[in-house]
Image: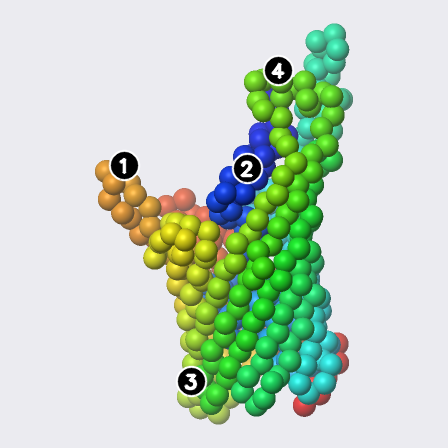
Amino acid sequence: MKNYYLVLLLSLNYSISGQINSPKYSNEFLSIGVGARSLAMSNSVVTSTNSAMSGFWNPANLSKINNDIQVGLMHAEYFAGIAKYDFGSISKKIDEKSGFGFSFLRFGVDNIPNTSELIDAQGNVNYDRISYFSAADMAFLGSYGRKINEFLSVGGSAKIINRTAGDFASAWGFGIDISSTYIKNDWAVAVVAKDITSTFNVWKYQLSNEMINTFNSTGNELPKNGLELTLPKLIIGLSKNYEFEKNIHLLIEFNIDITTDGKRNVLISGNPFSIDPHIGGEFNIKDIVFIRGGIGNIQKTPDLTGKMNYSIQPNLGIGINIKGVEIEYALTDIGDISIAEYSNIFSLKFNLNPKTN
């Protein structure tokens, strides 16, 4: 019998073996993005995020938070609710020049049936012997940002990664992100270096005798402990803020993601560098109503004849800020209209103390 956990562990094992030589898409759950504002703007936010979400997007911007303490929360579900994605963050203003934050992410699939002991020693099928487990990816980030002068801010994040597949497999990892933001007049430029030292995950397997027998009887190689690396990624952002009337603004932000793990199916694909551009906009009415949109996830894939086809993912969203509490909504994952895939994302930001400036 083909067991779910067997397929899962084999995928993890092959991933690790390949990652040592070509670590593509490692820790990819950290590339989904956090916050409905960000997702509505196709993750084009590294210059403009100045909230509790900054610890994830650009820790340098923690120096720009206007509130003593701010909390950000998000919950999303993917694949008809099978996978759940949760994010929480808190930021604290230290002084007029600096701030810090703590963030937590979890992307997981719960209640996966483990049928390794479905058949007893006598060959009888006993459904009471089915147990359940979770496969989850988690990250903990501690971040700090500081103003160097009137225009320039710098920051960094240290992150701890924990990935598990029930009691069968687990990994711990560590990585560092650094960033800077330069703002003058209505223009802003940001550079974010993710996994600057390469983030590593050390995998360890703990297989029961039943699992080992299942692997052997199905002719599959037993997974081995190993090291998975995440190579650095550079995000460069440029934004312009237009003021039409008093308290009515339009922000346009353009970002490019430069990965170093080889060819990807993005707009500019190369080896080892691939470039993925995306753009977003936010219409701000009196800091109360925000209308957002973006275009990203530009993919190019060959068809059966070898002809290259291109696809894009548009995103939409709205935000409402009422007395320091902002409710955000995004309609995202709608790039493939033919199968009507989409997700409704909600997030919440609220200030525990009034503005300090």
The residue tagged 3 is: 242
Residue 17, label in figure: 2
Q: Which residue is drawn at 66% across and 36% down?
A: 225
Q: Find numbered disc 2 in the image and state the secondary structure of the residue it sits on.
A: helix
Say whether marks 3 and 2 touch (CB < 8 Å).
Answer: no
Mark 1 and mark 2 lie on one chain; the one further toward the N terminus is 2
Task: Name the quadrant of the N terminus.
Answer: top right
Quarter location, residue 288: bottom right
From the viewer's perspective, is the residue at label 4 or at label 3 nearer?
4
Task: Name the quadrant of the C terminus.
Answer: bottom right
Looking at the image, can residue 282 be seen?
Answer: yes
Mark 2 and mark 4 lie on one chain; the one further toward the N terminus is 2
Q: Relative to 78, say whether 111 is above or below.
A: above
Say whether marks 2 and 4 touch (CB < 8 Å).
Answer: no
Dot 1 amino acid type: Leu
Q: Distance between the residues labelled 3 and 2?
A: 49 Å
Q: Is residue 159 left or right of residue 186?
A: right
Q: Find numbered disc 3 in the image and state the secondary structure of the residue it sits on.
A: strand
The residue tagged 1 is: 304
From the viewer's perspective, is the residue at label 4 or at label 1 nearer?
4
Q: Position of residue 87 (x, y in %)?
A: 65, 59
From the viewer's perspective, is the residue at label 1 or at label 3 nearer?
1
Q: What is the basis of the colouring in this image?
A: rainbow
Q: In this view, does 147 lie to the left or right of 252?
A: right
Q: How far apart are marks 4 and 1 (CA)?
A: 37 Å
The residue tagged 4 is: 217
